[in-house]
Image (cartoon, rainbow, N blue to C red):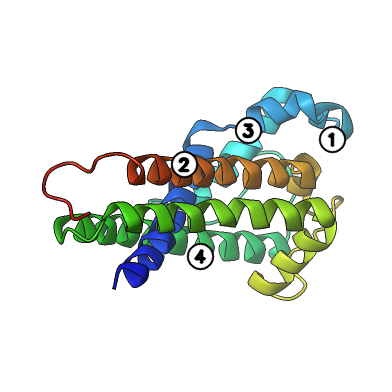
């Protein structure tokens, strides 16, 4: 029972942390705002920082779960291919946000049912930490292959290899930016896993099982 609860908790923590990390990226503009300079996006794209941010913000606004607008860009060209691609992105974002919300409710349920014992927290924390470790190992082995496999698995065929001349948004979204996003979300997993291990090694508050 405790092992099952720990595995359920770890899945919920991973999903909630990923959704929370994505929400921070989505709402704050980080790490993209820093990557404009760090990755020389203005120089490689031939666009000003202001124009880059206008188009990036248009994409993030479209991807918001609260937006019902059609995909469009203020100054860059786009085709049906990028329209379909970002529609797929929106679906994935919405699913992750939904799963994150359901995971938060499940975590509250586990806590109210007094199933988050120290052992459960330690097991869940270890599993949660294993995820970013595995992700880092895969990414460091071959990020390019991982990036391609991820898109081939989750996106419509032929819609994620955009032509920079026709779909200008790809000029301001280098692969390294997505790597930074993945590492940023992984940091939330690390913090969540470490917090569970810390709580699992401390005296649990009254009302929780040991």
Q: Relative to 18, is 163 on the left or the right?
A: right
Q: Residue furthest left?
A: 207
Disc 3 target residue: 31
Measured Cα–Cα span from mark 1 to mark 3: 18 Å
Figure quadrant of the N terminus: bottom left
Q: Nearer the viewer, residue 153 or 133?
A: 133
Q: Quadrant of residue 81?
A: bottom right
Measured Cα–Cα span from mark 2 to mark 4: 31 Å
Residue 111 placed where, x, y %?
A: 21, 55
The mark lying in front, picked from 1 and 4, is 4
Q: Relative to 48, is 120 on the left or the right?
A: left
Of labels 2 and 4, earlier in sequence is: 4
Disc 4 target residue: 91
Of labels 1 and 4, earlier in sequence is: 1
The mark lying in front, picked from 3 and 4, is 3
Q: Secondary structure at mark 4?
A: helix
Measured Cα–Cα span from mark 1 to mark 2: 40 Å
Disc 2 target residue: 194
Measured Cα–Cα span from mark 3 to mark 4: 22 Å
The mark lying in front, picked from 2 and 4, is 2
Q: Nearer the viewer, residue 178 or 183?
A: 183
Q: Secondary structure at mark 3?
A: loop
**Other residues around mark 2 within 10 Å, as few (<14) / some (14–19) / many (≥20):** some
Q: How many marks?
A: 4
The mark lying in front, picked from 1 and 3, is 3
**Tags 1 and 4 touching, CB below 8 Å:** no
Of labels 2 and 3, earlier in sequence is: 3
Of labels 1 and 3, earlier in sequence is: 3
Disc 1 target residue: 45
Q: Relative to 80, is 104 on the left or the right?
A: left
At 50% from the left edge and 32% from the top edge, which residue is drawn? Answer: 28
Residue 160 placed where, x, y %?
A: 74, 63
């Amino acid at each position: 029972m405790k092992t099952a609860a720990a595995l359920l908790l770890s899945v919920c923590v991973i999903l909630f942390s990923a959704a929370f990390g994505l929400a921070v990226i989505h709402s704050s503009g980080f790490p993209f705002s820093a990557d404009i300079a760090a990755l020389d996006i203005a120089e490689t794209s031939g666009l000003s920082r202001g124009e880059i941010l206008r188009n990036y913000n248009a994409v993030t606004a479209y991807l918001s779960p609260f937006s019902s607008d059609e995909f469009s860009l203020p100054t860059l060209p786009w085709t049906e291919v990028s329209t379909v691609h970002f529609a797929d992105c929106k679906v994935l974002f919405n699913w992750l946000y939904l799963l994150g919300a359901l995971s938060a409710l499940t975590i509250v349920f586990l806590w109210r049912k007094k199933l988050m014992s120290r052992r459960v927290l330690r097991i869940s924390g270890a599993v949660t930490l294993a995820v970013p470790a595995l992700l880092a190992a895969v990414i460091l082995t071959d990020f390019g292959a991982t990036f391609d496999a991820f898109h081939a698995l989750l996106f419509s065929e032929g819609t994620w290899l955009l032509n920079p001349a026709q779909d200008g948004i790809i000029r301001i979204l280098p692969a390294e930016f997505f790597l930074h996003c993945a590492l940023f979300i992984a940091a939330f997993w690390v913090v969540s896993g470490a917090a569970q291990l810390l709580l699992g090694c401390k005296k649990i508050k009254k009302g929780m099982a040991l």
